[in-house]
Image (tube, grey):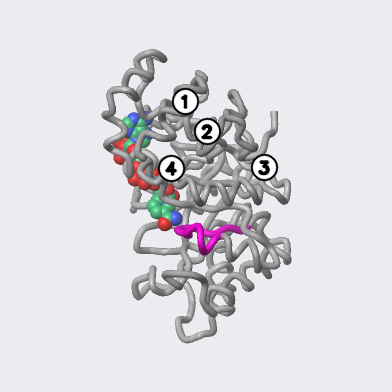
Amino acid sequence: MLFYGWLDSEWGAGVSQYIGDSSMTLKAYNNVPLPSWMYGTAWKKEATGQLVQLAVAAGFTAIDTANQLIHYQEALVGDALQALAKQGITRESLFLQTKFTPVNGQDHRTPYDVKADLTTQVKQSFDSSLSHLHTDYLDSYVLHGPYARHGLGAADWEVWAAIEGIYESGKTKMIGISNVSAEQLALLCERATHKPMVVQNRCYAALGWDKEVREICRAHRIIYQGFSLLTANRGVLVEPDVRAIAQRFKTGVAQIIFRFAMQIGMLSLTGTTNPQHMKEDLQSDQFTLTVEDIQLIETIGL
Ligand SMILES: NC(=O)c1ccc[n+]([C@@H]2O[C@H](COP(=O)([O-])OP(=O)(O)OC[C@H]3O[C@@H](n4cnc5c(N)ncnc54)[C@H](OP(=O)(O)O)[C@@H]3O)[C@@H](O)[C@H]2O)c1
């Protein structure tokens, strides 16, 4: 079953509608499908390649990385893809997402000439990503974060236009933005030639699980990718009400959070380094939260 990330709420203000059972496929407004899970490769250092292989063996089909050596080893993701190809796991069977990281998110090891104009920087970074990942196309290419703190400035528009150019060339199937505020996303949706198809944000329960941004995504059929669902919400993981839900389903609290995210149409990222947790995270589609459970979790941090 294919479904969109969000449907209109029929539950009243502020609460998302339950939209699926164990469906594993999402679709953005340009109708490109993507899995509802993504394996995140940040902070894995030299273990990156091995963990990507373990994640794919566990069942993940989408991989997130960035051309940003401070936090990611994109080239080691590429090495893992080559090893997987030798085992018969084709490039086409995987969803690959990487990012253009502006200079303020890089150290001295920038994958582009910092003196070049921004359009050239994006092109150089993208070409370097293709080379690292041993591929001639991406499934999703994401701006790691806007340059401007508030609103969008000239640098943001120039970089977004360069990313749109890559999309128009057919070298990426989707484009997106990360670490974006509701104000910035609304501006981008209003003025861009191509709206983002994905948004990747840290997802805090205290902000209604990024409610404002998710609502814009719903309105524009943009897929919302949530990261740090567990690490940004440690208080939620020990809430007695959430633990009671986990006990009722005889599962862990992590799976309850991931299942909640899935049922409200969110794509979850997990960065687990533990093969058992990889399996547990993927198994969080094996039960269905009730409307009341979802209402409780969605409003728990407010
Ligand atoms: N766009 C951005 O700026 C940005 C920023 C941060 C992250 N990201 C992306 O998001 C990805 C994930 O980041 P994240 O912050 O969500 O991941 P993370 O920091 O790696 O957090 C996952 C944590 O949850 C634990 N965990 C996962 N499954 C579990 C389970 N079933 N039971 C118990 N603990 C579990 C992991 O522990 P174990 O390892 O022990 O399982 C780990 O401590 C990154 O790798 C990256 O791709 C993007």
Of tags 2 and 4, the one toward the viewer is: 4
14 is higher (above) or lower (below) than 200: above
Q: Amino acid at mark 2?
A: Met
Nearer mark to the viewer, of 1 and 4: 4
**Residue in the foreground of this view, choosing between 108 and 75:** 108
3 or 4: tag closer to the N-terminus: 3
**Label 3: how many Cα within 10 Å (few below 14, some 14–19, many 20+):** many
Determine whether the residue tagged by mark 4 lies in a helix, strand or loop: loop
Label ID, residue 284: 1
Quarter residue 23 falls in: top right
Residue at left 47%, top 62%? 144
Task: Please say whether residue 172 is visible from this viewpoint.
Answer: yes
The percent position of residue 292, horizontal first and vertical second, equals 47, 22
Kind of residue at badge 3: Lys
Residue in the foreground of this view, choosing between 66 and 87:
66
Density class for disc 2 (Cα within 10 Å; few <14, some 14-19, many ≥20) is: many
